[in-house]
Amino acid sequence: MKDKIKGIIRESIEAKEKLLSEDQVAVLEKISNKIIEAYNSCRKVIVFGNGGSASDAQHFAAEMICRFEKDRMALPAIALSTNTSSLTSIGNDYSFDKIFSRQVEALAQPGDVVIGISTSGNSPNVLQAIEEAKKLKAVTIGFTGSKDCKLKKNADLCFCAPSAVTGRIQECHILAIHVICKLIEDTLFKDG
């Protein structure tokens, strides 16, 4: 069991070390800049995903609304996985595939940043919401893994965690979210 534990930790470290590549750093910088531009233009962030990715979406929204490391004004962010009445009514009246796209239709405006998180990159409800956001002229961002997927092709920008293992992908996603939060705060609140 100890060898297995060490193997999992090494695998996590190896995936995170790959985030130091110029390509990975560049995409995190581009994503951060898009969100900063949106906030500077009085726009908002809308974020969503399923399962563990729903938790990551909620975590990101909470960091924006509450704070990450600095005491500062709240920033507008909405996690679409939190309203059980909307989720269940849309799932029941339409389909599970529409639980995010209907909310995006209602909430997204041109210039908002819409972030879909999917470790597979092929979750139909995430993909439909990204398509809806594009129709509404929002900036679309995907978070996924290293495998070829539809989310990479459909989003304006995509952070692809350098792993095909769900746990490692999620660990890279949360690190990327923390990096983005830090860059947003340090840019928008230099004096805070």
Image (cartoon, grey):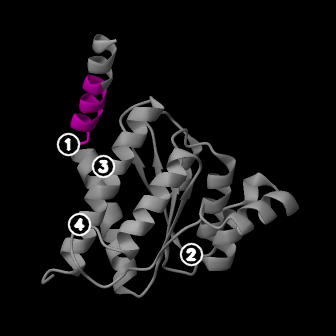
Q: Tell which circle, 1 or 3, labels the residue nearer the N-terminal end.
A: 1
Marks 2 and 3 close (CB-CB < 8 Å): no
Amino acid type, residue under disc 2 in the picture: Lys
Q: Residue furthest right?
A: 93
Most prominent secondary structure in the magenta stretch? helix
Give how far across and how far down residue 45 sits, in percent: 47, 72
Amino acid type, residue under disc 4 in the picture: Leu
Q: CA distance from mark 1 to mark 3?
A: 12 Å
**Which mark, by number, is residue 183?**
4
Q: Tell which circle, 2 or 4, labels the residue nearer the N-terminal end.
A: 2
- The residue stretch that appears in magenta: 9-19
Q: Which residue is mark 3?
A: 175
Above/below status of 73 relative to 146: below
Amino acid type, residue under disc 1 in the picture: Leu
Q: Tell which circle, 4 or 3, labels the residue nearer the N-terminal end.
A: 3
Q: CA distance from mark 4 to mark 3?
A: 12 Å
Q: Tell which circle, 2 or 3, labels the residue nearer the N-terminal end.
A: 2
In the foreground, 82 or 168? 82
Marks 2 and 4 close (CB-CB < 8 Å): no
**Which residue shows up at 23% across the image and 66% down it?**
183
Q: Which residue is mark 1?
A: 20
Q: Residue furthest left?
A: 191
Q: CA distance from mark 4 to mark 1?
A: 16 Å
30 sits left or right of 21 in the view: right
97 sits left or right of 130 in the view: right
* Mark 2 nearby-residue class (10 Å; few <14, some 14–19, many ≥20): some
Give how far across and how far down residue 126 sits, in percent: 62, 54
Residue 146: quadrant of the picture: top left
